[in-house]
Amino acid sequence: MADAEVSLSPALLPLHLSPTHSAAPPPPASSSPTTFSCPSSPSSASSSSSSSSSSSCSESSSDCPAHHHHHHHHHHHHHHHHPRPQLQLPPPSNSEQPSSPSASPRSSSPSGSIGSTGSLGSSASEGIGSSGTSCGGDPRGPSPPLDVISEDAMEMDLGGDQVIDPEVALKACQEVLLKVKLQNREVPEQQQLDNKQQRDAQPQHQHYTDLTECSSPQWHISPDTSSIKEEEEDEEEDAEKQGSTSQQCPRPSARPESSLVPSAASSSSSKQSWLLRLFESKLFDVSMAISYLYKSKEPGVQAYIGNRLFSFLDSEVDFYLPQLLNMYVHMDTEVGDAIRPYLIYRCRGSITFSLLTAWLLGAYSSDMHISTQRHSRGTKLRKLILSDELKPSAPSSNAPRAVSTSDSPVSSPSHRHCHRRHNSSNVESSFSSTVPGPDSPVLGEAEVFVSPSRRTHQRSKSDATTASSGPGSGLRRTGSNPKVEAVHEEPERLRPQREFVKSLLGIGKRLATLPTKEQKTQRLISELSLLNHKLPARVWLPTAENQHHVCRIPHTQAVVLNSKDKAPYIIYVEVLECENFETSAVPVRIPETRIRSARSAENLDCGSAVLAANANAMTSEHRAGSFSTVPNYDNDDEAWATDDIGQLQVEAEAQTSSSDNISQFSVDSITSLESKEPVFIAAGDIRRRLSENLAHTPTSFRRDPEDPSAVALKEPWEEKVRRIREGSPYGHLLSWRLLSVIVKCGDDLRQELLAYQVLRQLQSIWQQERVPLWIKPYKILVMSSDSGMIEPVLNAVSLHQVRKQSQLSLLDYFLQEHGSFTTEAFLTAQRNFVQSCAGYSLICYLLQVKDRHNGNILLDSEGHIIHIDFGFILSSSPRNLGFETSAFKLTSEFVDVMGGLDGDMFIYYKMLMLQGLIAARKHMEKVLQIVEIMQQGSHLPCFHGSSTIRGLKERFHMSLTEEQLQLLVEQLVDGSMRSITTKLYDSFQYVTNGIM
Amino acid sequence: MYDEIFAKEDPAKNNPRFWDELFLMKVNLEYLESKLESVDGEEVQRIQDNINSLFHHCVQALGEEHQIKVVNALQTLCALFRGVHQKNKSTSGFDIINMLMGFDKAEQRMKDLMERLDSLLCGDGSESLKSLCLKLLLCLVTVTDNISQNTILEYVMINSIFEAILQILSDVSSRGQHGYDAVVLLALLVNYRKYESVNPYIVKLSIVDDEPTLDGMGMVVHQALTEYNRQYKDKEEENQGGFFSTLTSMVGSMFIADADEKLSVQTNEAILLALYEAVHLNRNFITVLAQSHPEIDIATTPTTPTPTTPTTPLGTTPPSLDMMNNPELPLDPNLQTSNLLITFLKYASIVMQDTKDEHRLNSARLCLIILTCIAEDQYADAFLHDDNMNFRVNLHRMPMRHRKKAVDKNIPSRPLVCAVLDLMVEFIVTHMMKDFPMDLYLRCVQIIHKLLCYQKKCRIRLHYTWRELWSALINLLKFLLSNETTLLAKHNIFHLALLVVNLFNMFITYGDTFLPTSNSYDELYYEIVRNAPGLRQPLLYGSVILCLPVLRVSTNTGQWKEPASKVTHALVNVRAIINHFNPKIESYAAVNHISQLSEEQVLEVVRSNYDTLTLKLQDGLDQFERYSEQPKEAAFFKELVRSISLNVRKNVSLNTLSQDVLLKEFSTIS
């Protein structure tokens, strides 16, 4: 229970703390940006819609408790109170919260038991699945209302032509789940409340509808006919003529999922309800969802989870994106189908997500055989994404089509309703307008889902047009509205970023052909300077946290990193943060030289003062644009500006007064010496100052042509930022930030990504368990199976560089950098060192990280060590030379920094490791799951052999008692320390690669 | 038919289609020009109407769809301009305007002409036609020796074709074909009455900030200079290859400066002028200097300028859409990355080798002026000193007796400023001759001074072998002193001496802010001390008197008294150093019974005796006079432009574009 709570988003936490108010949904204001971030959503920013959605949230929260009790009858009431039962998806997380109060007391099962529910889940889904596969109407469980059955059956018949098996199965499965709930539901009153809640929740549901419209009608369970036909045909007609229209609907499609969610009420029933309750409890987090998605063989369960993905925060799901995509690529169709709608929905919503997905799909597909690869799902989806057809609706294309669609017989009845709706509800109109427009390609690709939604499409398009023509539509002012974006964004919304990345990777490839580091660096700089010409642009660094546009690459700062035959390089990137990467305007380019005062005007001679004035007058229009972007320029404490002014003044004097050829200033200085008291200085002082100044910068590394990155990486980040900011024409802007990224070409980063995920998972586990282990997972961006980007660790240099540059032992280096043993700074650095050592020792042990030479271990300015390069993990090790048999790297130098074998800090180190191992063990499943899923279909060397997962599992030592664990840690530490192989390996590296 | 024009009557009187037919005929330039020349004063009055009419119809014909007519009209116009000017060298510009167009209609005519040319240049028409337009403009601009006396240009000022020129430069293909002419034309137009009136071209050039355009301009200059460098190198190799030339390697440079060479220097003056105007007027152009290109080998790829820059200005269109049109730099590991500045430095190193010839002297001067502008620019200084932008710059060095030509010297990759300093040192060392180029020396020392000021201000510790500079400067002082009397007849050597001494003062008193190592400060003292007067140590050779001669002159009365005393005052620290250390060194030698002190020993003495030495702090050392073209350089530029004009006029040949080629081209078009 505690686990689940922690894993929930922080915004939710306080809510759980108030038991009286049964799990209120998160404050809409805070949650809406994430939950509703889909660009196709009708603008959470717009005042009208946001207010309505927020009100709905609050209402729903108050209604919630009652809600599940009265769910029983809700299908009856739908007829009247469901104003727009569009194709509905599972409710967003906040509407889901209602179920938690009831769920929490019962299902207080810790995560361990969840792991064991795997069997439970499968058995549960057994029933579901069997009923599901038997297709259509009858399989609904215990006591379905008769009318529903017949209704469903009829629907099946009517729409049977288009029905495809998995889809049916899914639907059926969900229906079964529903039936279970319905059956278990006891309290039949308060339907009104129920309905009200539904209605209130709609604005939220609407956000998900565009997805369903485009591709996934199968998600929608149809508890009652009225809602079905409403959705299918005329959204508005429900109130008036449900019964009559029921015939028209070809298939059951949608039903507000919210009705399903709160249904887990009684515990009377079997495993099914257990599973159901688990799924609906707040404990059910993304991690579990992924796990069940992977383990469950039941299409129904998979489909349900696929559906549930929508209810999680984007950021939470994003973490598991590699797993999702690997499953999509390598697992069976059912899983793929279950995930696909979510992926498509997110791709529509975000350029970033689209590209990440496309890159990862490409990378994970690469392990397939070339012939199968071409036709694989992953490749197809990748093509679809890259074809850029998954974009939010384009209003321009709507306008012409509106005429035809509104004339079509299908839409005619709805036409009237649309208008009415526009008049009545602003929110709805803006919503409907966000329905994606370009149906053909998407649908063509996803034919499975097409038929039922086609009409809806057309209609919604006509809706859109009417909406945009309507006076009150809040479309345009919304920040996140895709239409606004589409207006000024050219059709190829993915292209700038793709080409940006392509250019960077291309540079890397070309650099690799150059023989020397010097040439590489020169070429890098010149290539980047050309790239600079195209900036700013709508491109971003995928490793960054915040939304931004890249505005400039300070090309001279880029350096090539140490690598034997590849040419990874680090670039620094100036960005301007913005509200929304996709919609905010791209910053205006400022010429490089704009950093200084306007020299062109100053330098014109003589009559040119007039002339310059004229120039300003003549071209004020021309210049206005460029100058207006830097209005604060003069206010900047730019040393140059003031200097220039000073010089100018003197210069002016000189011009007026001096007639001879001798520099006025030299004359001045001499005459002043004659007249004034001369100032004397001692030559010794100058010499001393020189040496002092030189000695004052001992922490900076010397320039080494063979290791150009050492200097660049050693420079404190703050200083680098300040320096680059000073030299940048964009530096004065408040939103200016400096980022950096390592571009790697020719390296497979998929293992790195896996390691990153494991590290992140362990980090959060340790945080959750309050074990002060320190690790620094650095972000990895896989762009293909042999290229990608890495987020550099700031303020860190490798131990190799430390040693080579400083010629000191590690301890002495600590003393030099942080002060003597007793100082606060040293003690802090030492503590950091110990905590990070413990963290990485565990990581190295658990993941079997090899190739641990000093070039792969960084030391940051605070004393932390950071391991990089996870090229050899799990089942793979370098060259099988038998080196590195120790569990992790612990040299005597490390021990020295910790204060020796008997020191408190060393004991602390071991204690930390024990605590960390205990904590990690507790959550082993979460770690295992990440690795296990990625093993699917993978040819990565880390999965070599058959025992990878088993080995990993064993290293968690689930069976040991804590005392035994403690012993184990002792042994590990002892073994690593005594292991001469570490040392041997270092010298081996030195001989072969010149790494100290 | 030409004769009919030179008849009294209106040629169209008898033949209404006269003008149409005229432009269908091949232009006989020589005949037309000579005809115009042969007309004498009286006749002019008579045929003026016809000439006006001809001019008018020429302009009209430019708008014709028929390309042959356009070509012929362009050529006729050219002949008209030339002929009229040749005839009336002495007459005022107004008469010429009157003769060509008639006063009352001149404004309209020229407006039409410029508009037509503008649309021809900017249109999608034939490239040859564009080329011809530029030739016509060049012809028009250079008809007078002194560009400022060319009154017709007043109309070119009013009806600017600046935008058309820029468009040519910004487009890759048109830049390749017409870039050179366009740049020269621009350089000349900028110099029209630049000191007397408001020249719109100056104004416009100074505010261009479109990077593709500026880059294009840089590329044209870059190519021209590269081509020159390549030619020079080829010749040099040729000369060195021969048996004969090895014998006469001393005079090898004289062979290089043959007629052909001079010619190429002359043409390059126009390009240099363009570079100067761009650097001087437009601060955005500074970035172009550092823009890296792969070294272009024109011999192999004569037509395609390598980097293709996008034509769309950034910011107006979605910029990254053309990201992939990114010019992929050719992948030759042996190809050095280069940029305009490097090429320029190489060029300068060639030009400055020999300054005896006037064109070369002018070129060298212009090079130094450009370097002065660059050294004053903060942004340029920033990238000159950028530690991350390292290049190997192979400067050309004059073959000299006492040193081997450092051909294969492996130049380390260093910040660009090192190359600039090298160039300055090279110049200082190689031009101490009787015909002392004082002006160039002054500029040279000032450039060094400006760079030092930047380093001091920004606390940049450049890892440069300063000793070479110090020794060059001291040698320069020695030279000045030993040739004092002869030099004083022509120059104020004290000004130069003062500048040099003040450079030393900067090192002495502010060395702590920008010297790279502690040792380098010791070496500075060593360098000063070992050249000091009065030292009897045989090791310390070259004991040329450093201070006393100046003192000697300054004690004399006369016109040099004041400047000489300034130098004396500036020398106070140098003298203090010498007076302080010399006895110490001598006593050290005496105590240790060493007749010859090694450098290390001298340095040891220096190190251990700092504390008893007091220096005088001189202020104003890090201030300098900023470069200004007016009034000091005005005369130089006037002359330069005149010479360029003459040269361009000589080389603009409309006939180079043979009619046949044109006809062929047009026949395929139509």
Image (spheres, rainbow, N blue to C red):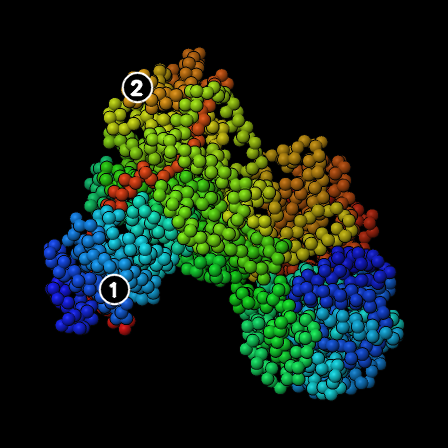
Q: Residue at x 65, y 46 (%)?
A: A866
Q: Residue at x 75, y 65 (%)?
A: A55
| Residue toward you, A818 or A946 | A818
Q: Position of residue B160 (x, y in %)?
A: 33, 56
**What residue is shown with label 1?**
B59
Q: Secondary structure at mark 2?
A: helix
| Residue toward you, A38 or B188 | B188
Q: Quadrant of the C terminus of chain A?
A: top right
The answer, for residue B556, to whether it is visible in the render is yes
When asked about the image quadrant of residue A482, the answer is bottom right
Q: Nearer the viewer, mark 2 or mark 1?
A: 1
In the rendered image, the vertical position of residue B7 relative to residue A846, given as above or below: below
**What residue is shown with label 2?**
B553
In the rendered image, the vertical position of residue B557 relative to residue A305, given as above or below: above
In the rendered image, the vertical position of residue A200 relative to residue A251, given as above or below: above
| Residue toward you, B284 or B429 | B284
How crowded is the residue under tag 1: few (<14 C-alpha within 10 Å), some, or many (20+)?
A: many
Q: Position of residue B46 (x, y in %)?
A: 13, 60
| Residue toward you, A556 or A776 | A556
Would you say B285 lies left or right of A12 here? left
Would you say B19 lies left or right of B593 here? left
Q: Position of residue B45 (x, y in %)?
A: 14, 58
Would you say A201 lies left or right of B90 here? right
Q: Quadrant of the N terminus of chain A?
A: bottom right
For disc 1, the chain is B
Q: Mark 2 and mark 1, same subunit?
A: yes
Q: Residue at x 39, y 55 (%)?
A: B213
> Are the residues tagged 2 and 1 within 8 Å (C-beta)?
no
For disc 2, the chain is B
When asked about the image quadrant of residue A855, the answer is top right
How crowded is the residue under tag 2: few (<14 C-alpha within 10 Å), some, or many (20+)?
A: some
The kind of residue on which mark 1 rests is Val
